[in-house]
Each structure stands twice: as structure tokens, then as C-alpha cells.
Amino acid sequence: MTTRIVWLRRDFRLDDNPALLRAAESAERLVVLYIHAPEEDAPWPAGAASCWWLHHSLLALSQQLEAEGNRLVIRSGPSLNALRECIETTGAASVYWNRLYTPMARDRDRRIKTALRDQGIEARSFNAALLAEPWAVETRSGGPYRVFTPFWKSIRDGLRAAAPCPRPMLPPCPAMESEPLDALGLLPDRDWADGFAAHWTPGSGGAQQRLSDFLDTALQDYDSGRNRPDLDATSGLSPHLHFGEIGPRQIVAAVDAASSDDGRTRSAQQADKFLSEIAWREFAHHVLFHFPETLEQSMNPRFRHFEWAGRDSDLQAWQHGQTGIPIVDAGMRQLWHTGWMHNRVRMIVGSLLTKNLRQHWRKGAQWFWDTLVDADLANNTLGWQWIAGCGADAAPYFRIFNPVSQGEKFDPHGAYVRRWVPEIEGLPDAHLHAPWTAPAPVLRQAKLRLGRDYPAPIVDLKASRQDALDAYAKVKG
Ligand code: FAD
């Protein structure tokens, strides 16, 4: 009787899962295995918000597998030991998995593949997570890309090269033990994450629902709407993509189907813009794969001598949404309460932290790592280095976002700020994004005592902008 193991890591779906399909189609018994081994991701084990998601994602997967006549087997690491133990218990002849691309996962997987093959076990890996794996794309001169637009041009025509693969019929799981999900201790002890469930439904069912809602509504105005944090105008697919509850091939196929149906999508241009954002994720994986040192170091070597400054009190005010700059505080509070922040606001809070407050981008990356449900090493590292001006295809350092004009432009009626910073909701729109400019009678009428009900700004935006530019001039060369 042929028994195979499919080792799931961040590919928690039954559809378009090539490792699962290949393992299931030729086996009489199938072990669907998740191994919990956070130490193997050091120094970047999943943060607290990710762990919350992981718990619920595994729960959803396990229910889905049971409905299909199989079940999820959970073990604790080290991964190689857990795999060997499962092979011994079940007599499995092969282990299949889908590839991950972080430097830590690649090293581990390479070691495990060799060890299993040495033992006479068939070990095979597949691509479930990307449209273009990092080694499959190169510049004309043969190296990796560092700039997004040529990367996008080079992958654009091949986006449909591989269609999503079908869901397999699952053979049953052999009798074997599994650790209870609760024993992994993934849920936080404090009630901080309680609110997440109101915003998210982890699992592939939740991912499909998000995608279909997005295609029915927001895709039609994606290009203009995507910058508006006050609107529900983006897909919200990022945590689902990170945990592989949906894959990019499924997204491309669904977007194509929606675009060819005139009644649903106004223009192929909107679909193209959305797919170009999916391609940013591909680009981030490409960059991290080829430049793994960027996890810790600025990609632009000039920034290795940059004079980062920054007081701890500023960092704490930023983390807790108490900077006195409304759009920044709204973003940081949205992050704390929902585990997610709108992309435009990620850029605004990132610019304030790395430029006006001159904190090292790693401090921002670390906080996001712990608090985002979509925390993803490739996207987070690229995002932080981009906004700090030191990464691949980064915004030029001198482009320092003015959070007041950004707020006025992208939250024009103040709905986003009023939702997350209710202390200042009584201010008229004209002063909402800069309460310190409001005359005393306006503050009185809004029942707002600056410095008491809501902080005065912790930084002078104009002076700190100049200080940042002066610091940059020293490394610019
Ligand atoms: P949509 O606009 O609906 O986009 C669809 C998908 O495209 C996203 O789900 C995401 O997978 C991908 N995508 C969109 N924009 C980007 C981008 N700029 N870079 C890479 N992929 C992108 N994204 C993460 O998934 N994890 C992170 O840890 C992360 N950290 C970030 C840190 C900073 C400082 C910045 C500026 C951006 C970061 N991003 C990160 C990128 C982006 O903010 C999120 O992917 C996006 O806000 C997710 O919302 P959405 O799914 O509604 O996006």
C-alpha cells in the first residue's frame, strides 16, 4: 500500500496545491502533515499577529480535510525528526512539499531533501506560491532585477503560463497520533487579538469570499480607490496570500474571468493595475531570494553609514498611535486593532518613522512583523527599505511624505481619521489632519484640549524634514 506524506507549511489550501495533488493522485494513504518549528525561522519566527492567524488557518484546514475524508496531522519540530518519525510510523515512501523562499526555509529544506534522499525516501518540491520563481526571471545581462518596472514587463506576458491545478480526491490518513492544535500555544494570552475575528476569516473559504467580493465591487475602481484608506477599495487578500490559503495563479484566473465578463468589470486596465500589485509581491520574493542580506542590511550600501537617530519615547509614541499626527495615529491604531494597515498609510507611517523621526527602518519592520496578520518577510523588508529610501527601486530619500497633505489628499473627508482617532472627531475637516493649526475657539468647540485629550505633535514636521535631508546629504556622496 503506497503511503505518501504531504508536508504543508504556508500552503493551507486544497485547490491549486501541486504538492497535495501529486501526492494524492498516486497514493492509497495520505498523511497531510503540519510541523510546528518556529525555531527554524529564527531570527524571524512568526510574530504574535501571524500566530493568531496561523492557529485559525490550521483549524479551518483541519475541518476542510475532515470533510474530505482525511485529517490534519500536527507535530512539533525539528522538522527532519518529525518527518522521520512519521515515515517510520506509516512506512511512507515519499514526502512532497511546496517551496518557500526565505533564506532560512531554503537552507532547511535543502538539508531535509538531501537527508531524506540519502535514506531512500523520495523527496520532491513544487511551486504553489509564485507566478515566477526567483531563478526563472533574469535581466538581459543575466542578473537579478533590482527595479520593478522591467521586472513586471518581463513577467507580464507569462502570468498565465500555468493554470491553477485541480483539487484532488484525498485518500484516507493512516492511523497515527497528532498533537492538539491548542498545544502549539499560538493564541496570545492577552485579549489584544480578540478584535481580529471581526475583520478576518482565516482559511481558504475566507480567501475565496474576499476575492469574490473584491471582484464584484472594488476592482472596478481599483486604480483610483486603492490609495484611499477611508474606502474599502483593496482586496484584503494579503494574509490569505501569505499563508497560501489562496495562490496567485487562482487570483490571475479569477481576475481574467471577471474581466471578460462585461457586466462585472469596467475595464481591463483596472485588472492590469491589480495584477501589477500582485507582481510587487513577486518582485519582493525575487529581491529577497537574490539579496538575502537585505533582511538585516540596507540594500543601498550608502545607508550602512547613515546617521540613524531616534529616541525610544518617539518609537513608543509611534507604536501606540500617540504621535499627535492624526493620519499616522489612525494607521498605527488600525494596525493594533485589526492586524492590518492600508498600504498608503503604511507608507505615511514608515516615512514619518524613518525620516522625520530618523529611526532605523528595522525598528519599523520589527513592529510590523509582530503586529501584522499579513507579516511577510519578503514584502515587509521590501516595503520598509522602499519607504526608507535605501532598498530596491526605492522612493528617493528626499521624497519625505508630508502626513498632513497626504491625509488631506487620501482621506479627504476625514472618515478614516475620525474612525481611529475619535478624540478629534469634532474638529472641522479643515483642521482635522493638523489639529495644532486650529485656533482656540475651534478647539473649544470641538471639545479638544491639545496635549491632554490628544497629544501635541511629537515632532516639528518642517524642521525634522530638513534634519533628515542634512543627514542624507552626508551619505549621498
Ligand atoms: P491589494 O491592493 O488588494 O493588493 C493585492 C496583493 O498584492 C496584496 O495582498 C499583496 O500580496 C500584493 N501587494 C500589494 N502591494 C504590495 C507591495 N507594495 N509590496 C508587495 N506586495 C504587494 N505586504 C504584505 O503582504 N506583508 C507585509 O509584511 C507588508 N509590509 C509592508 C510594509 C511597508 C512599510 C509597506 C509600505 C508595505 C508593506 N506591504 C506588505 C505591502 C502592502 O502594504 C500590502 O500588501 C497591502 O496593503 C495588502 O493589502 P491588500 O491585500 O488589500 O492589497
Image: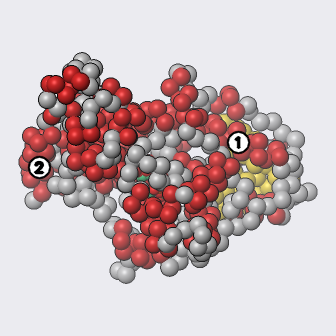
Residue drawn at x 64%, y 52% is 209
* Amino acid carrying mark 2 in the image: Leu
Q: Residue 326's image quarter?
A: top left
Q: Is residue 208 above or below residue 468?
A: below
Q: Are marks 2 and 1 in contact (CB under 8 Å)?
A: no
Per the image, the residue denoted by label 1 is: 60
Per the image, the residue denoted by label 2 is: 469
User: Counting residues from the N terminus, which is met first, the one under dot 2 or under dot 1?
Assistant: 1
User: On the rendered image, what quadrant is the C terminus found in?
Assistant: bottom left
Q: Residues within 10 Å of mark 2 (few under 14, many from 20)?
A: some
Residue drawn at x 41%, y 63% is 223
Question: Is residue 171 left or right of 274 when viewed as pictured?
Answer: right
Along the line of sight, the residue nearer the viewer: 409 or 57: 409
Q: Is residue 414 above or below residue 396?
A: above
Q: Residues within 10 Å of mark 1 (few under 14, many from 20)?
A: some
Q: Helix, strand or loop at disc 2?
A: helix
Q: Position of residue 173 (x, y in %)?
A: 85, 47
* Amino acid carrying mark 1 in the image: Ala
Whether residue 164 is visible to the viewer of this picture, yes or no, is yes
Q: CA distance from mark 2 to mark 1?
A: 49 Å
Count of numbered badges drawn on the protein: 2
Residue drawn at x 54%, y 47% is 239
